[in-house]
Amino acid sequence: MFEKVQIAPPDPILGLTETFKADPNPDKINLSVGVYKDATGKTPVLETVKEAERRILKQEDSKGYLPMTGEPVYCAQLQGLLFGEEHEIIASKRAATAQCPGGTGALRVVGDYLNFVHPDASIWLSDPTWANHNTIFEAAGLKCEKYAYRDPKTNGLDFDAMYESIKKIPQGDVILLHGCCHNPTGIDPTPEQWSKVGDLLAKQGVLPLVDFAYQGLANGIEEDREGLLELTKKVKQMFICSSFSKNFGLYRERTGALTVVGDDKKQADTVMSQVKLRIRYNYSNPPSHGGQIVAVVLSDKDLKAQWIEEVADIRERINEMRHLFVKTLKEKGVQQDFSSIIEQRGMFSFSGLTKDQVNRLRDEYSIYIVGSGRINVAGMTRDNMDRLCEAIKSVL
Ligand code: LMR
């Protein structure tokens, strides 16, 4: 059976990390996968995560299965983070959440749900979007379409083009919006633009699916939900995929969730009953450890406050690297204008480097950037900045 199997192409993001690991150059720099590095180049375990793990180790008394929708305390805490604890959606219980293995797991589950319940619906993705969005939804049997997003001339949002292309989305289709820190561009709509998009989606009967993987990394935990909250004012039904990989540093613990918001509790619970079966047919029930950590931290007022500080440190370091990167390139005499990178938010920026330049950075300098030109700013440090900018200058 196996003789005729062809070797699969490498994954555009995780495949690069495999090549990076095998690269013997001691000065290699990995700016491909979206993983945060501190000033010393390490991916740290947060202090609050360590404290939660100590408490879990003492208290945990069973390794029995979680429910298909995961740990209820985790799901409730996640809703508080998404909407704010006092929000009407929470009070009226018209949101239902399932803990999922990472944001990717949540996206696949919602893909399976859509394919099962709305097999004719297409899903519309921003152009560009995270390299794995297309593949996840296609694997779930959905048709993927594109809506306009980035203006290559300004390296900013082309809102008019975005709005016009959303106008063409047929009723009953689904649109994926990035909650904040758009991956791969780092460019987000303003709250006013979110509100306009919400009006349009409501008018057209298009279902939003918000991929919310970077809460806290743009402007703050509360500030980063602004776009989502604008949307909830205009549209009653939506899905939200969450991830705690980045803001809790829980990458390998696969800690995410899928939330459905409905017109009322009955509707949300009905949709969740279908989601539950997609979970059962995929992986049965989620892994527990990451969810326990998040639940412990968010349920303790002091630990939560400390975590918010830790997220602020991550955000501030990334923003400092944005400034230093642009400044260092300028000091080295690079003519190309990279200044829009300062305005962008989250881990990523679109550098505008061509595929050839990206390949040269990898082959000649052991600097790894995603083929699209996406740079993980969170992988820059004061120590690797000079070498990075010198190499970019030479390939330009
Ligand atoms: C990324 O975009 O690099 C991250 O979300 C990690 C991944 O799984 O691709």
Image (cartoon, rainbow, N blue to C red):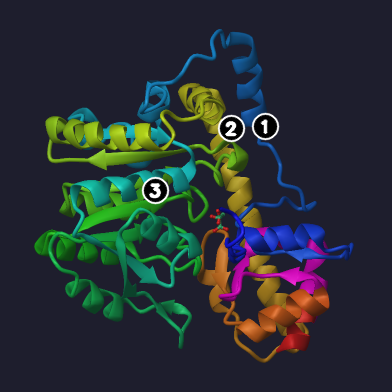
Kind of residue sitting beneath label 3: Arg
Expressed as whole percent of the image width and height from the top left, the position of residue 302 reads 54, 24
Q: Marks 2 and 1, Cα distance to the nearest angstrom?
A: 9 Å
Secondary structure category for the residue under label 3 = helix
The C terminus lies in which quarter of the figure? bottom right
**CB atoms at circles 2 and 1 under 8 Å apart?**
yes
Expressed as whole percent of the image width and height from the top left, the position of residue 361 reads 74, 78
Mark 1 closeness class: few <14, some 14–19, many ≥20 residues within 10 Å? few
Q: Quickly name the residue at label 2.
A: 306
- Mark found first going from the N terminus, 3 or 1: 1
- Mark found first going from the N terminus, 3 or 2: 3
Q: Quickly name the residue at label 3.
A: 108
Q: Residue at x 19, y 52 (%)?
A: 118
Q: Marks 3 and 2, Cα distance to the nearest angstrom?
A: 32 Å
Q: Quadrant of residue 135?
A: bottom left
Q: Is residue 16 above or below residue 284?
A: below
Q: Quickly name the residue at label 1.
A: 47
Expressed as whole percent of the image width and height from the top left, the position of residue 67 reads 38, 21
Which span is picked out in magenta? Answer: 366-390
Q: Residue at x 66, y 36 (%)?
A: 46
Q: Is residue 383 magenta?
A: yes
Question: Is the CB atom of the residue marked by disc 1 within 8 angstroms of ligand 1's nearest atom?
Answer: no
